[in-house]
Amino acid sequence: MRAVFWKELADYFGSWRFIIIFAVICLAALSATYTAAQTIRGDIAQTPTEYVFLRLFTTSGETLPSFIFFLSFFGPLIGIIFGFDVINSERSRGTLSRVLSQPLFRDSVINGKFLAGLTAIAIMLASIILVVSGLGLRMIGVAPAPGEVARIGVFFLISLLYVGFWLGLGILFSVLFRRTITSVLAAIAIWISLALFISMFAGIAANWVAPVDQHSEAEAILEHERIYDSVMRISPTTLFGEATETVLNPGKRTLRGVVLVREVEGMIPGPLALGQSLMLVWPHLVALIALILICFAVSYVRFMREEIRAT
C-alpha cells in the first residue's frame, strides 16, 4: 500500500489537474479574504475585537461572498475531480490488470489510492488556509489568539471531512461505472441535487407534513422549521455550512432557525468555549464520517469482488 500511496501522491502533485484546481481555489480564496479584510477594517471600531481574526473566514464583502461559501462550492469539485477516474481510467487503459498481476494485494490498491487522494486534499486545504491567514494577518494587523488558532484547526478538519466525502463518492462511482464520463456525470448529479435542489425538497416536505400560514401558532411553526432543517441536513453541504459557522462564530449558541423567547431566557450572554461549540456540531461530524465510511466501504467491497481481466 505504501508503494501505491506514494505513486498516486506523486501523480496528483505532478498533474495539471491538481495545479489548475489549486490555482483557481487559491485565487478565489484570496479574493474573498481581501474583500472580507477590507470590510473588517472598515467597521472594526464599531465591533468587538474579540475573535476578529475568525471573521476573515465568515465575512462577506460587498462584491464577493465569504471564504466558507467558496469552500462549500469548490469542495465537492475537488473531491470529485480527484476521485472520479482513479479505478476506471486504469481499467480502460489496461494497466489495472497489469498492476494486480504483480505480488500486490488488491485492497492495497484502493486503500493507497484513497489515502493518497485524502492526503493531497489535506495538503491543498492546509496551504490555502495558511495563505488566507497570512493575507488576513497582513491586512487587519490582528494576530489570532490561541483559541482562534484551535478553532481554525477544527475548521480544517471539518473541511477535510467534507471534501473527503466527495472523494469517496467519486471513487465509488469510479468503481461502479466503467466509463469515466459516466462516473463524473453521476457524481456531479448527486452534488447538484444535494447542494441546489435540497432546499426545494425540504420546503415541499415541511409544507406537506406541517403546513403553516399567517395564523399558525408558534408550535406549528417550530414543527415546520424542524422538519425543514431535518431534510436539509441530508445534504453534506448543509452539514458543512452549519458546522463551520458554529465553530468559527463563538457567539452562535443554537443551530435552530426559529427559537422561542422562553427558550433563551436565562442564557448567559457571551461566546461559547470551543468544547461547547463542538458539542453543538458533534452530530454533523459523525454524519460526515459515516458518509465517508459508507462510500468507501461500498467501493471497497465492490472492487474486491470485481472480476478484472487483461484487455
Image (cartoon, helix red, strand yellow):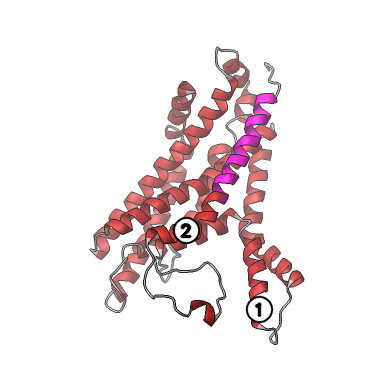
| Circle 1 residues within 10 Å: few <14, some 14–19, many ≥20 | few
Can residue 69 be seen here? The reply is: no
Q: Is residue 2 above or below residue 157?
A: above
- Numbered label tally: 2
* Image coords of residue 13 (percent x, y): 42, 34
| Circle 2 residues within 10 Å: few <14, some 14–19, many ≥20 | few
* Image coords of residue 179 (percent x, y): 68, 33
In the picture provided, is 111 more to the left or to the right than 132?
Answer: right
Q: Does label 1 or label 2 sit earlier along the sequence? A: 1
Per the rendered image, the range of residues in magenta is 287-305
Look at the magenta stretch and give its main secondary structure.
helix
- Seen at 23% across and 63% down, the residue is 141
Q: Is residue 39 above or below residue 135?
A: below
Q: Which mark is residue 279?
A: 2
Tell which of 52 and 91 is nearer to you.
Answer: 52
Q: Residue furthest front?
A: 266
Q: Is residue 132 above or below residue 38?
A: above
269 falls in the magenta region = no
SS class of the residue under badge 1? Answer: helix
Tell which of 39 and 151 is nearer to you.
Answer: 151
- Seen at 47% across and 54% down, the residue is 71
In the picture provided, is 287 more to the left or to the right than 10?
Answer: right
In the picture provided, is 237 more to the left or to the right than 128?
Answer: right
- Mark 1 sits on what residue? 219
Quarter of the figure with residue 19? top left
Disc 1 and disc 2: Cα gap in Å?
26 Å
Quadrant of the snapshot with the C terminus: top right
288 falls in the magenta region = yes
